[in-house]
């Protein structure tokens, strides 16, 4: 269960606009947990609609499988309705420790 | 300016209790920016008082200098007044890319 990769998703949600977002987000959270190699995630959004989601992965295959996931791909088409801005970065981990 | 290390600080704030927190947090944000090797940070806290702060560092020396920083050390003594729970993890980065 060693973390090999971290994916950091930062975003700002559009205002006053759900347009299916909550349902899709809840469904994707269930879907991603089924992907082999997915370990866990942490997600926070503040009152100004800025969010950080960090997901932890055992291997790159899991991240690639999630990228090709059908529900995920369908959601990505609608991302511009939900986010003013967003950014995704993948970090390959060499080592980690608690200070 | 390559990111060599990421520090992820997750926490839950105590309720209804500032006790100097905002001033100290604002001051520490100015202090950490002076540390050689510090690159940037992202910080989010939601309405349930859960927070994620990610800081990006060029090298380990910067993280060690921040650990020894006087204002930072003084603040850490008071951390149990401000946080119900918190966790810090340092991630050494081997590679990164946008998907």
Image: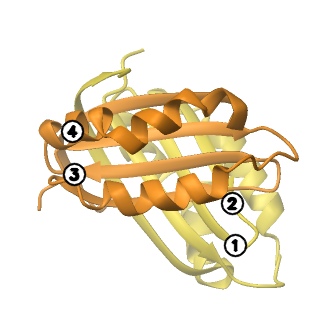
Chain colours: A yellow, B orange
Measured along the vertical axis of the image, is residue B48 above or below residue A3? below
Q: Residue at x 11, y 62 (%)?
A: B1
SS for callout 2: strand
Q: Nearer the viewer, residue B92 or A61?
A: B92
CA–CA distance between discs 4 and 3? 24 Å
Q: Residue B35: horizontal and vertical position, in percent?
A: 22, 53
SS for callout 4: helix
Pointer 2: what residue? Answer: A45
- Which mark's residue is nearer the viewer, 1 or 3? 1
Pointer 3: what residue? Answer: B96
Pointer 4: what residue? Answer: B65
CA–CA distance between discs 4 and 2? 30 Å
| Residue B65 visible at all | yes
CA–CA distance between discs 4 and 1? 33 Å
- Which mark's residue is nearer the viewer, 4 or 1? 4
Please tell me how crowded label 1 is: few (under 14), some (14-19), or many (20+) other residues with Cα within 10 Å: some
Pointer 1: what residue? Answer: A49
Quadrant, the N terminus of chain A: top left
Please tell me how crowded label 3 is: few (under 14), some (14-19), or many (20+) other residues with Cα within 10 Å: some
Q: Nearer the viewer, residue A54 or A58?
A: A54
- Which mark's residue is nearer the viewer, 4 or 3? 4
């Amino acid at each position: 269960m060693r973390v090999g990769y971290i994916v950091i998703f930062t975003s700002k949600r559009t205002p006053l606009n759900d347009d299916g977002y909550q349902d899709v987000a809840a469904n994707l959270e269930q879907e991603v947990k089924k992907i082999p190699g997915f370990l866990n995630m942490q997600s926070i959004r503040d009152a100004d609609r800025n969010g950080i989601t960090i997901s932890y992965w055992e291997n790159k295959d899991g991240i690639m499988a999630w990228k090709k996931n059908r529900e995920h791909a369908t959601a990505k088409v609608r991302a511009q309705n939900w986010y003013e801005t967003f950014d995704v970065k993948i970090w390959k981990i060499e080592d980690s420790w608690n200070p």
